[in-house]
Image (cartoon, rainbow, N blue to C red):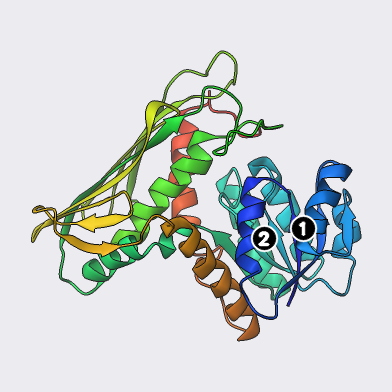
Amino acid sequence: MNLCMVGYGSIAEVHRQSFARIPGVEITAVVGRLLEPTQAFAKKCGASLATVDLAEALARDDVDAVVITSPSAKHAVQTQAALEAGKHVLVEIPLALSLAESEMLTALAAQQGRSLMVAHTMRFWPTLAAVRQRIAEGELHVHSVYIHYGFLRRQNVNWQGRQRSWTDNLLWHHGCHAVDTALWLLGEPAQDVAGYMGPPHDALGIPLDLAVSLRTPREQLVSCALSYNIMRSMLEIVVIGEETTLLVRDGKLVDPSDQILAAGGEDEEASAGLLQNLEFINALRQEREPIVSGEDVLPTMRALQAVQDMNPQNPHQQ
């Protein structure tokens, strides 16, 4: 299986390491914004082509699938180009920065007969999978879900402290993680949606605080509070059920007595990333739809669009 990597940033490196652990997978092409770092990343990948021209890479017969790890605002147009070129696509979260683009890409993938998978990596965390299994099997009847997610990002840097050439989007990126996780856990779409964003940051031009409230058709409530202002990195998921309350934090799933029910370990995210990318490759080899297809994430994108429409101060394009 031959891949083309689009992007050479921190998350691209995570994918490179992941795919290097999957037998029979090679990265044969790398596409980037600047030629010199593209060439450096291509050398690490062992790719024969390094280019700033996506069309050049998509024209190659030795590219079976494209992995898009570029800035969020590029995801839709690059995914569209790859699908139109007849390539399968794994695209980093978010699929797009609007519901309309997400629906277009999902329809295009079906029309082209190509797989479109979105990197909603949290769906592959063992701690969250254990919660979802309990809910799906009727062992936990959920009343509400609370997600607190954030870290300090008042400068235009990524999660590894690297300077960015683009600005992130709290709603469509990390808000997408939070909302999707809640809806996936419950196995329900959002029936009612409300969301509020703080004022744009003076230097970055984006809101740094977000509150989203959802209600499912079963009248389950979801509250997501996200911030790029928080001084301590935090991801805490509380699932309040009739039978018990479960907490996912620091790579562990615990009950009210602090008993550990499941643990993903310190490298939970890396392990989940490997499971995610292995799922993409196996789906292509087995000629089936991958888990977390474009169609699967549309309920999340509908909820995000509703919040976007309520907050015109949040820029679509970064």
**Which amino acid type corresponds to the residue marked 1 in the rendered image?**
Lys
Q: Residue, x 63% and y 61% (percent of image)?
A: 17
Mark 1 surroundings: few (<14), some (14-19) or many (≥20) residues within 10 A: few
Instruction: Give the position of the C terminus as an image quadrant.
Output: top right
Labels 1 and 2: the sequence-earlier one = 2
Provide the secondary structure element on which disc 2 rests.
helix
Left-right relation of 94 to 151: right
Instruction: Give the position of the N terminus as an image quadrant.
Output: bottom right
Provide the secondary structure element on which disc 1 rests.
helix
Residue lying farthest to the bottom in this orientation: 286
Are the residues at dot 1 and dot 2 in contact (C-beta closer than 8 Å)?
yes
Q: Residue, x 53% and y 23% (percent of image)?
A: 313
Q: Residue, x 89% and y 51% (percent of image)?
A: 53
**Which amino acid type corresponds to the residue marked 2 in the rendered image?**
Arg
Which residue position is annotated with label 1?
Answer: 44
Task: Residue 268 in the image: state x and y as whole percent.
Answer: 41, 59
Mark 2 surroundings: few (<14), some (14-19) or many (≥20) residues within 10 A: some
Q: Residue 106 occupies which quadrant of the picture?
A: bottom right
Q: Looking at the picture, does residue 174 appear above or below residue 259? A: above
Q: Nearer the viewer, residue 309 or 21?
A: 21
Q: Looking at the picture, does residue 60 appear above or below residue 285? A: above
Which residue position is annotated with label 2?
Answer: 16
Q: Residue 111 occupies which quadrant of the picture?
A: bottom right
Q: Looking at the picture, does residue 214 appear above or below residue 310? A: below
Q: Nearer the viewer, residue 256 or 45?
A: 45
Q: Residue 112 occupies which quadrant of the picture?
A: bottom right
Q: Residue, x 61% and y 50% (percent of image)?
A: 11
Number of numbered callouts drawn: 2
Q: CA distance from mark 1 to mark 2?
A: 9 Å
* Residue 298 appears in the rendering: yes
Task: Residue 205 in the image: state x and y as whole percent.
Answer: 59, 20
